[in-house]
Image (cartoon, rainbow, N blue to C red):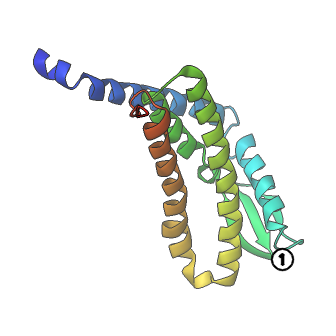
Amino acid sequence: MKKYFILYKPFLFFLATFFLTYIALTFLYQEYLNSFGENKLDRITQFVGQNTKQVMQLFDKSATVEENTLEPYIKLFYSQKYVARIIEGCNAISVIILFVAFIVAFSGKLKTTLLFIFGGSVLIYVLNVFRIAILCFLMFNYPNQKQFFHGVLFPLFIYGVVFILWLIWVNKFSRYASKTTKE
């Protein structure tokens, strides 16, 4: 058994670090959400709603958002038509937590790791806001394709970006990145 532990130590260390980071960040985020009480919208989701409105107004100056007073979501209006809603799960924090846990598990130098986490998180947030705004535009113009856009195309996009960021991290910056020598 000891032989297998030694043989798979890097993989086991990666798994332990990934899951501990993921669980800790998820716990902290859940505590943050619980601080708002039942049927109250958290500040991050409100901020995503406002940023989405700003992006939507690039296409349509009359685009607006409206917070629902009975349930925790934001209504999105495009050309005076209700097209979608933003719930807590749309704010990309769970995706950012997944991204951060992977980067920490494959960490490199502290400064590089922290900068990559910050930059990647900001990129994911910004792309998510644009994703929601474009999704509203597409759902307004192609309402019959709502399931495809929301359930397939845009999750593929956001998780694809996270995957590419992971590849860049592992290949360029992590402690496992191959160090090529100049000949």
**129 with respect to 8 (left or right):** right
Q: Position of residue 141 (x, y in %)?
A: 69, 83
Q: Residue at x 49, y 44 (%)?
A: 168
Of residues 160 and 167, which is closer to you in this image?
Answer: 167
Q: Residue at x 62, y 54 (%)?
A: 90
- Identify the image quadrant of the N terminus: top left
Q: Position of residue 110 (x, y in %)?
A: 56, 21
Instruction: Look at the image and tell me whether residue 140 can be seen.
Output: yes
Of residues 73 and 16, which is closer to you in this image?
Answer: 16
Q: Residue at x 55, y 56 (%)?
A: 158
Q: Pick out the residue farthest to the top.
A: 2
Residue type at tag 1: Gln
Q: State how many labels appear.
A: 1
Displayed quadrant of residue 31 = top right
- Identify the image quadrant of the C terminus: top left
Q: Position of residue 161 (x, y in %)?
A: 53, 54
Q: Residue at x 68, y 47 (%)?
A: 39
Q: Position of residue 122 (x, y in %)?
A: 67, 43
Q: Badge 1 is on which residue?
A: 80
Name above or below for residue 106 compared with residue 152: above
Q: Pick out the residue farthest to the right.
A: 61
Considering the numbered disc 1 on the image, is that residue within a helix, a strand or a loop?
loop
Of residues 39 and 151, which is closer to you in this image?
Answer: 151
Name above or below for residue 146 compared with residue 100: below
**120 with respect to 68 (left or right):** left
Displayed quadrant of residue 12 = top left
Name above or below for residue 133 compared with residue 87: below
Q: Pick out the residue farthest to the front.
A: 183
Q: Could you classify mark 1 by the number of other residues whose Cα lies within 10 Å: few (under 14), some (14-19), or many (20 or more)? A: few
Instruction: Look at the image and tell me whether residue 1 can be seen.
Output: no
